Image (spheres, rainbow, N blue to C red):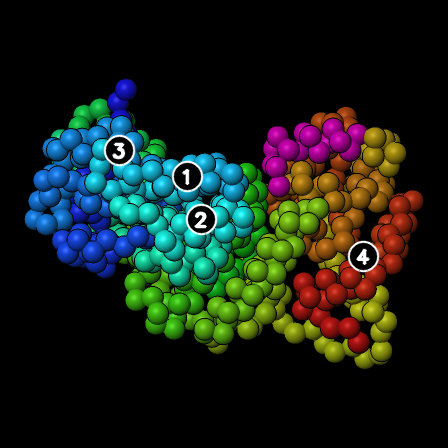
Amino acid sequence: MSRTISQKYRPKNWKDLIGQNHIKVTLENEISAGKIAPAYLFCGPRGIGKTTIARLMAKSINCTDIQDKHEPCNKCESCLAQMENRALDVIEIDAASHTGVDNVRENIINNARVAPSSLKNKVFIIDEVHMLSISAFNALLKTLEEPPKNTVFILATTEVHKLPATIISRCQRFDFKRPGVEELADRLMQITANEKIKLDKSIAESMARFSEGHIRDAESLLSQAVSLAENGEITQELVDLVLPRSDANLFIEFFITLVDKNITGGFAFVNKLVEEGVDLTEFLKAYIDFLRKLMLYKIGQEADIMLHFDFDKETKKALVAKLKLISLKQVQKMIELFIEKFQEIKYSSIPQLPLELAVVELCSTDENSNNDNNTPNNPSINTEPEPEPQEKQTPTEAVKSEVKEEKIEVVTNKDCKLSVEKIQDNWKAIIKATRKENHALALTLKIGEVVGCVNGVLTIGFKYRFYQDRVMDAKNKPVLEKVFTEVLGDRICIDCVIGNYEVTQKASSVKLEEPNNEVVDMAVKAFGGKVV
């Protein structure tokens, strides 16, 4: 059976390790001096070499022909037995599968009391040790404190905070760090050179950057790319097939849209995410992390954004230029707002609504830009301040005045005999037909209500103005009218209302409930108004 690249090129000597110099030098000195600790604790992120170094340690302290005082020879019977996984005195245990106290007594404690059978030292490598139960830790504690002669324990974990302090205190602890992009890219270049495959340094850096410092992930990506390299060369087009789509450019596009206060562009961006089937929860989580890195860059902790994202220098230049237009406080506001929306989106009946409200809030105020010109890019948005009300209004009246729609010219059809009941009976078929034309419009119709149909003018009611704007958009309105006409069999013209449906369309039998406090708060927040 052929081996993967990560298996084939697993380091066999200390000199082959990537990074971790602070750990490598210490362990090499201990091996050279013959001062081996009874227990070691390797902790750090996944896929960066904890198990690899544990095996190297076991091989080095048992090698019968040690090289340079610390390097295993890889030729003696001890080294060969370990490399071929037939060394009975090197015992690897997955703690996730042996969590109970009985497993620890049988597989570790009792086994540790028996002297090594063929090697100089018996080595226990316990992976994911944090998975052990409290009782198992207590049973292991005494053995770690007074281990049998010629027995070494190496514990590895990705979640060191879950280990009892009594266990940690009895181990020599080493904290592993992720290697840099340059180190990881050089590793990939070295592997492809051995495989006689051509790989450009920039492509290697792209793969290293995407793996975020996880060596195993980078080698796995390279393994997929190598399997596709028919002509002995890994090209950018080939790597694009292997790498999942990078969200960096999407993040930058959304960020620039918000900084420019382009509310139309913001809604178009959200709609594009929905149409492409992007998980909005995952997108927001990653976008918040993106904003955090921008915040660190603003305060000078991150000297180079290129270390985290895979985009070219021109894109970086555009991003840095936009960052100069906003303050650190405004970046903080963005992060806080999207964290709030991240919580709301999990429970929203309309998944994109919290994200759309965030766009409205950031694009319709003057707080997220340092420019003197705070006019949005969308010329249809009226940014002039509305006059103060002359008379005291109730909260309901205040909301109605904020969401009062403009008069839109519609074409009537006096011969149309369609009733509200017939339209409501065919509503699901209309939404299904609309989904084939535009998925986002279908979602919008789901939250609309049929208000009335008079002289071929179908009136749809919405609670929020931005849904009315979406339906009445010059591109969307003809699409919807075509769908309605095809499904209902009669020429239809669409009109929209928001607020009190009964007052606006007397022909309707549908009534809108008086807005409650929650609706008032949402409307005031969305449209920048105030309750008087």
Report whether 43 appears left or right of 465. Answer: left
Quadrant location of the C terminus?
bottom right
Task: Say which of marks 1 and 2 sits in front.
Answer: 1
Secondary structure category for the residue under label 3? loop
Secondary structure category for the residue under label 1? helix
Q: Which mark is residue 30?
A: none
Q: Earlier in the sequence, mark 3 or mark 2?
A: 3
Residue 202 visible here: no
Q: Earlier in the sequence, mark 2 or mark 4?
A: 2
Residue pointed to by mark 3:
117
Instruction: Find out whether residue 216 is within the magenta segment.
Output: no
Tell me which residue sits at (22%, 36%) in the image. Answer: 119
Residue pointed to by mark 1:
110
Tell me which residue sits at (50%, 61%) in the image. Answer: 258
Report whether 119 appears left or right of 338. Answer: left
Magenta stretch?
A: 426-440
Residue type (three-letter) at the residue carrying disc 2: Leu
Residue pointed to by mark 2:
140
Tell me which residue sits at (50%, 51%) in the image. Answer: 138
Residue type (three-letter) at the residue carrying disc 1: Asn
- Asked if the residue at tag 1 contacts the one at tag 3, i.e. Cβ–Cβ closer than 8 Å, the answer is no
As measured in the structure, the alpha-carbon distance from the residue carrying label 4 to the one carrying label 3 is 84 Å
As measured in the structure, the alpha-carbon distance from the residue carrying label 1 to the one carrying label 2 is 11 Å
Residue pointed to by mark 4:
499
Q: Tell me residue 42's x, y (percent).
A: 34, 52
- Asked which quadrant contains residue 327, the reply is bottom left
